[in-house]
Amino acid sequence: MTTANQLHPYNNQPLRVSKDYGTGPWAGISTNTLKRFLRVPTTATMNDLTVTAERAGALVESVTSYSISEADVTLKVEAKYLRADQDGDRWLDLPFGPVNTVTSVADSDTTYSSDLTLQNDRIPDRVKVPEAAATTGEITVIYTVGQSSFTDLPTNVQQAVLFAFGHFWNVREAVSSPELKQIPWSLDLICQQFTRSVIG
């Protein structure tokens, strides 16, 4: 998890960001999907499958900085650190991508919620600060990341969560806190496909 003293390299200031997961990770994940991955009959009665899957998703998210679970993110920055590009536009890098939508950009006087430009064909994703927004004081950006349904995640992300899930389920004593020391090679390999920077 990003701590308050880590600096946002683009804005050169303490990163102040919070994530609200609402109802929690992928309420729609199928226990049958998890049972098939464990190679047990789908008729088997097994407790704690969903909880273990959520722990696996949290592990993959922390390793890759790829936002898996749906969340509303609130980012606060000081406007004075926002530098204009060669076109005179001020862009703000958004931590914890990929970003789905930007809900609003606000300064101390005005909240802008329409005609916002999100650039998500790069890492990290970024939003254009409205031209009329203040150049001093605090800028607050609210945006959404992650997916509410497990099946809406990219296939390689789903596979990484299942790898982590299988490891948590089958080798529990090796991954119980604080002994978690090493990620299985197969999980490490697949995570490399979509790992983002802490800011990304």
Image (cartoon, grey):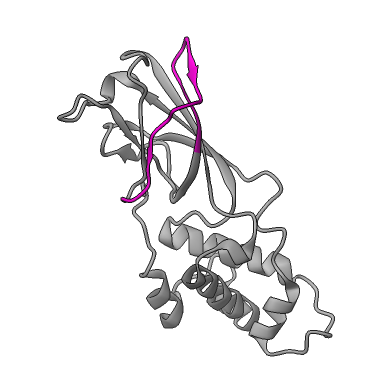
Per the image, is 17 magenta?
no
Q: Is residue 79 above or below residue 119?
A: above
Q: Is 115 a magenta residue?
A: yes
The location of residue 186, given as percent across then percent down, is 43, 82
Tell me if residue 46 comes above or below residue 5 in the rendering.
below
Extreme residue in the top direction: 109
Work out whether residue 134 or residue 138 is closer to the camera in this orientation and state it. Answer: 134
Q: Which residue lies furthest to the front in this view?
A: 115
Q: Which of 126 and 183 is in front in this view?
A: 126
The structure residue drawn at horizontal position 41% and vertical position 81%, both measured from the top left corner, is: 185
Residue 7 picture quarter: top left
Q: Give the range drawn in magenta.
A: 102-122
Q: Is residue 108 above or below residue 120?
A: above
Q: Position of residue 19 (x, y in %)?
A: 55, 41
| Image vertical order of residue 22 relative to residue 78, above or below | below
Q: In this view, does 92 lie to the left or right of 41?
A: left
Q: Measured from the top left, where is residue 103 in percent x and y? A: 53, 32
Residue drawn at 59 percent across, 70 percent down: 176
Q: Is 128 displayed left or right of 184 in the figure?
A: left
In the rendered structure, the answer to whether residue 26 lies left or right of residue 186 reads right
The structure residue drawn at horizontal position 31% and vertical position 50%, both measured from the top left corner, is 122
Q: Residue at x 39, y 64 (%)?
A: 194
